[in-house]
Amino acid sequence: MWTTPSFKENIGGLTVIQAVYAFAMALGLREVFLGSRTFMTNVAFSPDGFSLERVLLLSALLLNMMLLGLRFFWVPRNLRGLIFAAVKARGHQGGRLSADEKGKQRKIPLKDITVALHLIVIFLHGSVFYFLCVEFEFIAFAASSTAPFDAGALSGYVVIHVALLLLNSGWIASIQRQEARMRNEASPAKNASAAAGSVWWRNNLLCGLLAIAPLALLSTCGNSGVACLVGTGPGEVEISGLTPFAPDHVYASVVSVFHLFGVDDAFLATGLISVSLAFLLANSLFDLFKTGSTYLLLEEIEWAEPKDGGGPGPTGPVTGEGPQ
């Protein structure tokens, strides 16, 4: 006996987006592993001995990259949360719509251009993450060579990492604003990703600005970023801005204070870069410790056709709390 087939639609397309994005992330992590392997072979496990400073530096950077990758593998779920909130908000408004209006509703109540922009931002995340991984590989190769290695090699890594955090912060903040507008219109409760998103964008913004601040300070001492980071004396340091917003002569003023305690320019510059790296690592640790369980929760939506075939049935998210 044949049974009547049932038809359903869902947002499985986001799973495809997640898979493609994860592939781009994996390409970047491959560069990290290649650079790490080279460093461990040539430096960490070299029979000729190793540099403790370089081993500690690369170990801290590798930990930072692993934690960042763990967090940013889930970037597409923010779009999933937005779609979930949009459909859920419409479900709360359903009682105020006529049958004809319900039949004309879009299943995903977001404009096509809005969805397209979010998809572009998602893959922009993947691209910037890949560039960050390539920068890590460069640092690992530089640290593996016999050439002098200084903190100047880390400035590019810090800038790209901060750019990724600020991109993510701005994007999540815009999603939060859209979701807040939907809640104001329909008054449903926050979903899990919306609550965690408030932590994510604020944490990324704060730590990103704190991490770039030491580079902004270093940018005030002349016209060569590397020269500033490896300067040997008070009169020999000349660096121009790595960033356009740092005031002139700030670095010289800070240096003059530290000179009173016998701290030279090169040591101070290395210390400032280390502070930037510490803020970046703290960003990932706080994120995971504060919202780690949220990464395991994914919203799902399904639309089912009615058994009598009389047009589209009720739409709404599957939440485990009964039909919307």
Image: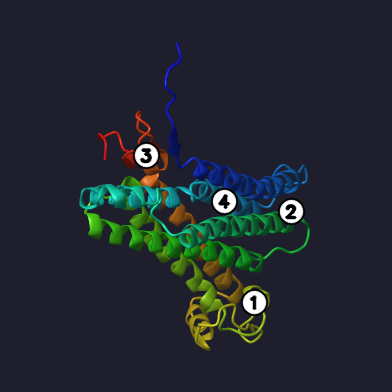
Q: Earlier in the sequence, mark 2 or mark 4?
A: 4
- CA gap, disc 2 to disc 1? 22 Å
Which residue type does callout 3 highlight?
Answer: Gly
Q: Mark 2: which amino acid? A: Ser
Viewer-nearest of discs 2 and 4:
4
**Position in image of residue 315 (x %, y %):** 33, 42
Mark 4 and mark 1 residues within 8 Å of each other at the beta carbon = no
- The scheme the figure's colours follow is rainbow
Residue 305 % position (x, y)? 38, 34
Q: Considering the image in quadrants, where does the N terminus appear?
A: top left
- Mark 2 vs mark 4, CA separation in Å: 18 Å
Which one is in front in this view, the residue at disc 2 or the one at disc 1?
1
Residue assigned mark 4: 65
| Mark 4, secondary structure of its residue | helix
Closer mark to the observer between disc 3 and disc 4: 3
Number of other residues with Cα within 10 Å of mark 3, as a class: few under 14, some 14 to 19, many 20 or more: few
Mark 4 is on which residue type? Met
Q: Along the polypeptide, which appears first: circle 2 or circle 1?
A: 2
Please provide percent x and percent y for residue 6: 42, 27
Measuring from the top left, give residue 13's x and y in whole percent: 52, 43
Q: Alpha-carbon neighbours of circle 1 within 10 Å: few (<14), some, or many (≥20)?
A: many
Report the residue marked by disc 1: 225
Circle 3 is placed at which residue position?
Answer: 311
Query: How far, Cα to Cα, is label 3 from label 1?
Result: 65 Å
